[in-house]
Amino acid sequence: MKLASTALATLLAAPLFAGCGSSGGGGPDQPISGTILGTPFTPTGAAALVVAPAACDLGTDVSLTGVVMGFGSFADVCGFATSTELCGDKASALVVPVIVMRAREAASGAVPPLGPGTYTHAAVPVLDGNGYLSQVEADVIRTLDASCTHPVEPELASGTVRLDVVNATRVAGSADLVFTDGSTFAGAFDVPVCAYQADLCGLITGACPTPACVP
């Protein structure tokens, strides 16, 4: 399951190098939903991965932490993520993965775990006053048939994610996301945490070039 692209690695790394030298869907209090690729979408299942701070080489050494959420048209999103190790496509399905992350230069020490707050997608992320870079990314992953054929899938154009609760059992908050084709995904979520430990570095740098197609 594609959860980020190599372009994201570039967006994250660039400000760190520099440091060196209205939408559809539910409202903020309504369950998250939207219109994806022209079709109404309300998730059947969802799961979250809370990723502990870890070192990552993005051209410069950074410390990364984050939350990865997957909203799917099928029930067992956690089981799917675990069985495929985040490198699979679900046949004839739709998944909207959402990543909220924070990074800083490893030389400045480990980045603190991601906590409650409002995070925004930026075309070019900038460092905040504490030297942290935060970013929101999301994808639309649609498979049309049993062979996991993909249509043209849009990228995130703008959006915010508010995290109210981040702990070992659940991630709760709201999102308001708009994609480049006009697809929207917005509303409140309260997602159980999946026990699978994700490699956030690998997700960002594209460690899954050829996802397996899973029935």
Image: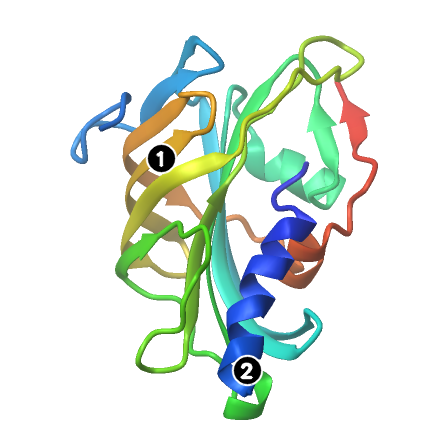
Residue 143 picture location, percent across and down? 67, 17
The CA distance from mark 1 to mark 2 is: 28 Å
Q: Quadrant of residue 149?
A: top right
Does dot 2 land on a helix, a strand or a loop? strand
Residue 188 picture location, percent across and down? 25, 36
Describe residue 137's horizontal placement relative to residue 178 as left or right. right
Q: From where the camera sits, is residue 53 visible?
A: no
> Which three-letter amino acid code belongs to the residue tagged 1?
Leu
Residue at screen point 68% across, 69% down: 58
> Which three-letter amino acid code belongs to the residue tagged 2?
Glu
- Reading the image, the residue beneath label 2 is 105
Q: How crowded is mark 1: few (under 14 residues within 10 Å), some or many (20 or more)?
A: many
Residue at screen point 36% across, 28% down: 185
Q: Which colour scheme is used?
A: rainbow
Quadrant including the C terminus: top right
Residue 206 picture location, percent across and down? 73, 50
Q: Which residue ends up furthest to the front in the rendered image?
A: 21
Q: In which quarter of the image is residue 133?
A: bottom left
- Reading the image, the residue beneath label 1 is 177
Callout 1–callout 2 Cβ contact below 8 Å: no
Does dot 1 land on a helix, a strand or a loop? strand
Q: How crowded is mark 2: few (under 14 residues within 10 Å), some or many (20 or more)?
A: many
Describe residue 143's horizontal placement relative to residue 76 as left or right. right
Residue at screen point 56% across, 33% down: 77
Describe residue 147's horizontal placement relative to residue 11 as left or right. right
Query: Reading the chain from its start, which is encountered first: label 1 or label 2?
Result: 2
Q: Which of 127 and 184 is in front in this view?
A: 127
Residue at screen point 33% across, 23% down: 33
Q: Nearer the viewer, residue 141 or 183?
A: 183
Residue 179 picture location, percent across and down? 44, 29
Quadrant including the N terminus: top right
